[in-house]
Amino acid sequence: MASSSSSSRQMKHQVFLSFIGEDTRLNFTVHLLQALKDKGLNVFFDEEKLEKGEELSHALSQAIAASYLSILVLSKDYASSQSCLAELSDIMDRKRKPTDKHIVLPIFYHVDPSDVRNIGGTFKTSFEEHESKRPIEDVKRWKAAFAEIGASKGWHIGGKSDRFETEYIKDVVEYVLKKLNSNCRSVSEELAGIDDQKKKLLVLIEQSGIHVIGLWGMSGIGKTTLADAVYKEVSPKFECSLFLQNISEKIKKQGSESLRNELLSKLLNNTPSIGYPYHERLNNKKNTSCL
């Protein structure tokens, strides 16, 4: 069975985060970054993006190519940055390629999506400045990408909604996990009959009183593959989750206490010690899942 180029290409990051530092670096963007990392996602975040920027560096272009998904935080000064526009253009080029299957999610942060789509408001002024300094072909390419992302479905923060930004961030993270899980299925998950088996396990999980489900069978028949497929399906519904493999071997090598500490450190984001109140912290989690 042949795999697609996007699944066979080595991906270093799950998410590429595009933003302009002056607008959101110390508030919304850093909170979104932390929420994504808390879910165990590898996020490319340009730590040096403090100025309005110039050309798209080779490293940034490589980071975009090595990411499954891009999130663009479109704020009022985004179009003033040449590097942001170059990033956006490169991201949209990859989105258009059917072989790349690159996912693009825009967040309209205190800007009107119609102003992005129609290049109006302060964005018009920014592009006029670029036209006076940059080759016209560059600006045309940036305008096309900007208008295209403005017509894309995303989140509008700062409109008439009375929701907290933390609620939007939660929605974004859940959506990202859902898209990544559906987009990044391995070739092994395409094995005949696995979807039927997965559906049966999902029905069991939804039943009240079910806390542990065992998969029993000889080695090599796909138990781990099936468990991984189920985990990818249900993990976005939980506040914290973890997929542990080869438990018996790990207990023999490092002992049960070491494995317990590994489990708790990943679920609670720090290493427990003697007297550590991990029971209380786990109880404070709305949902916890381990497979």
Image (cartoon, rainbow, N blue to C red):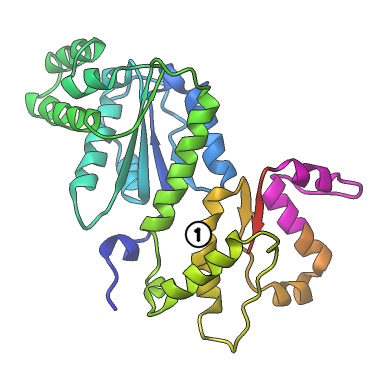
Q: Main secondary structure of the magenta part?
A: helix
**171 up-or-down from 23: above or below:** below
On the rendered structure, is 284 left or right of 68? right
For label 1, the crowd category at 10 Å Cα-Cα, with few meaning under 14, some 14 to 19 and many 20 or more, is some
Residue 30: x %, y % from top left: 52, 28
At 78% from the left and 69% from the top, the residue drawn is 254
At 51% from the left and 85% from the top, the residue drawn is 221
Q: Amino acid at mark 1?
A: Lys
In the image, 80 versus 281, the foreground residue is 281
* Image quadrant containing the N terminus: bottom left
**44 up-or-down from 112: above or below:** below
Residue 72: x %, y % from top left: 35, 32
Q: Residue furthest right?
A: 275
In the image, 139 versus 194, the foreground residue is 194
Residue numbers of the magenta segment = 261-285
At 38% from the left and 23% from the top, the residue drawn is 20
On the rendered structure, is 165 left or right of 215? left
Residue 178: x %, y % from top left: 44, 50
Q: Quadrant of residue 135?
A: top left
What residue is shown with label 1? 232
Number of marks:
1
